[in-house]
Image: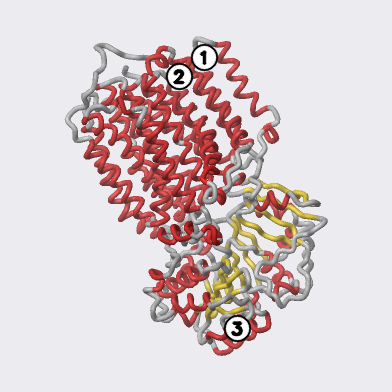
Amino acid sequence: MKGMPSTLSASVFLLSGSALAYEVMLVRLLAVTRFHHLAFMVLSLALLGYGVSGVLLARQRARLLGSFQAWFSGFAAMFATGTVCCFQLSQRIPVFPGEWVWSPFEALHLAALYLVLSLPFLAAACGVGLAYSARGTIAGSVYRADLLGAAAGCLGALPALWLPEAAGLWLPWSGGFAASALMVMPDRKGWAALLVSAALLGPAVNPEHAVRLITSPDKPLSIALSAEGVEILTDIFTPIGRITVTRNRLAPYRYAPGLSLAFQGSVGAQWGAFVDGGEAFMPLPTTPERTEAPTYLDYLPEALAYRLVSQPRVLVLEAPAMEHLARAFAGEARAVNVVLSNPGWRTLFEETRKSGPGRYLALPNVHLTVGAPRGFLRSAPRRYDLIVIGDPAPSALTPDHLHTVEAFGEALTRLSSGGILSVSGPSDLPPRACLRLLATAAAALHMSGVTHPEDRLVMIRSLRTVQLMITNGPLTPKDIAEIRSFCTDRRFDPVWFPGIEPAEANRWNRIDAPLFHDGALGILGSASERFPARYKFDVSPVFDNRPYFSHFIKPATLMEILSLRESGALGMLSFAEPVLAATLLQGIVISILFVWLPLRRFRATEDRRRAGVMVFMLGMGFMLAEFAVMEQLRLFLNEPVLATAVTLAVFLSMAGLGGGMTSRRSRDGTLRFSGFAALLTAGILVVYITALPPVLKVFMGAHPAVRTVLAMVLISPLATAMGLPFPLAVSALKTADTRAVPWAWGLNGCGSMIGPVLGMSIAVYGGGTWVFGAAILCYGTAFAAGLTPSISGTGRKQGETIQP
């Protein structure tokens, strides 16, 4: 065929776009109802549907192609129905990762969860894969419609993330039914009208309450809502996070982490602000008054900075800001600028401006900025006396670009002479987070040209928290005396300051041994280069190339912890690492059982095995390269959601256009064109691994619009090249054997399913550069597999052409 029917092109576009929109929304919805690392895991395994669809298409090829329009329409309708129904069903499946170590059978709930969520993807993949099979000789045209639709779906899903509850799911619902109706519209107008009615009826009938979110019972928000007397004051949905504000009239919140045991007063009643059900929590005062700052604030570790710097100009970056706003209210801070990435906070403060925490914004010396903290640091117009950074991200799989060597270095450049960078963290046992904070701070000072960073670092601890302070200048004897006096009066234990005595380190919040001080000596002492390698946990400095601050578990330590689970050692696990390992293992096992083994009969010859390796590696390499670039742009664009949208949209659209350029190539039954395209992609990746980071660094301070356009321009050549190999391989396989197309589709989906999980594993343990290297290896392997001179098979019957 020389062309592709417009109805089929539009239907593939709509179906693929709806599937991608569903995937983007699931990431956000599962982060709210479950946990962030489960959202990543489930969506990676949801790509199982694309692999299994190849099995179904390979076994039922003749039957499905015999009634192409009906089956394509049916698959699209099944996808649309499944987006809402399967998500509702998945919310009833209990998944508690903490129980897996005790009872491996509990992991079956996880298997049920991702199998249920993969069903809509299976239906969509069957529809798109059927189009590849029917029009295999113009695979590039199908590929173009597929990926351009996916790019449009990715961008279209972003506005839907502002909708309350799960109302955004009606977008893929409508898109799926529209694709179904469009396919049968010319011949079955009555059926098409019914499908169009279904597409419009779902969003029209009370969408906000039709699909309600059910938060997992082990999340802090669910626990808080189970108490008597609690009520929800407001619920704000944004693409970055859901903010739920609650209060309890019977037992008001009185939250002050790190509060000194010497405090004898009362913490005032508060509201509780939960982000994504408890991934982050911010206490909000109910009735702020412009008098003195609440007494308890002077009994928190953060108060030490106000002892060392009088009347500071304060910058708060992604941290609970109420303490600093209260000090501005009482005149103890000259000015306070709060930077929060979630726009929902501005909405909340605006709603409570008359009565509640929003009253703080009425002060002329208080400013709220919504944006990325790193971006604000680069463009801040003034210097600050005190810069405050909140706790590190709790999940080991969450990239945290605010607690890296580069971030601390940028913050130091914005400090006035004698200013302080104050960073909070958990007081965990054995010490992990505090030691990594010290190591990261020391590396940042070294990078800034300070030869003795230990002379500019202070760390104190309470029972639950630690507070790190980095000074922009040497500490004076007066400062040291103030630190000692503050710790003695408030019953805090110093972990480190210049001249600390070992006897001072473990006096008030006593443990069996001064582990925190001993660790600080290891990090900052003469054996600092050897200490991280000897320590049980990974406490090495965190850099932008590997920004997973809360990943402390070394492989050997993980096995030791699991062996001591009956002794209470599991408390040291975040469960992100076991989830990641289980995801990768299950992905491999499922790929073998549900894709490779059923398709084995199509791989009887050596040449066919080479073709299988090629399409598998192309799928895995595509996802690895996409993941690596997305991690680079996450920091460059300063907005995670924007980085995800730009990366996916550009990769998918440009790869689709690249695939469309292949329509007239590789019809001679060989894979050499696909192999050379894979080699070209590998070569471009080699250039990117060396040239992309320095180029992005040069333009890091440019205007956000300039950076967005530059990012799109920079990744377009790579994305276009990545769109060439797979359609060329499919065209070659179609020429040799028409039955090989669903086989190739299944193996490519299988590689795509494993790619994101493997990419995350490599990024956590090795960094983004290693992910680029893995992608290069995949494309290089695909090139080697494409050197086979021909693809043997039963061949296509003379004149056989299957049309939709």
Real-space CA distance between mark 1 and mark 2, rounded to the nearest whole angstrom: 9 Å
Question: Would residue 349 be found to the left or right of residue 84 on screen?
Answer: right
- Tell which residue pokes out farthest to the bottom in this image: 477
Quarter of the picture containing the C terminus is top left
Residue at the disc numbered 3: 483
Q: Residues within 10 Å of mark 1 (few under 14, many from 20)?
A: some
Q: Amino acid at mark 3?
A: Ile
- Sequence order check, earlier mark of 3 and 2: 2
Real-space CA distance between mark 3 and mark 1, rounded to the nearest whole angstrom: 77 Å
Real-space CA distance between mark 3 and mark 2, rounded to the nearest whole angstrom: 73 Å
- Residue 444 placement (x, y as % from top left): 44, 71
In this rendered view, identify the residue nearer to me: 235 or 561.
561
Quarter holding residue 336? bottom right
Is residue 468 something that shows in the picture? yes
- Residue 280 placement (x, y as % from top left): 62, 56
> Relative to 155, is 65 above or below?
above
Q: Which mark is residue 185?
A: 1
- Sequence order check, earlier mark of 1 and 2: 2
Q: Amino acid at mark 2?
A: Thr
Quarter of the picture containing the N terminus is top left
SS under mark 2: helix
- Residue 642 placement (x, y as % from top left): 50, 47
Residue drawn at the location 55% of the way across and 90% of the way down? 477
- Sequence order check, earlier mark of 3 and 1: 1
Q: Do callouts 3 and 2 mark residues in contact (Cβ within 8 Å)?
A: no
Q: Do callouts 1 and 2 mark residues in contact (Cβ within 8 Å)?
A: yes
Residue at the disc numbered 2: 7
Residue drawn at the location 64% of the way across and 86% of the way down? 485
- Residue 408 placement (x, y as % from top left): 48, 68
Q: Residues within 10 Å of mark 2 (few under 14, many from 20)?
A: some
Question: Would residue 314 be found to the left or right of residue 415 on screen?
Answer: right
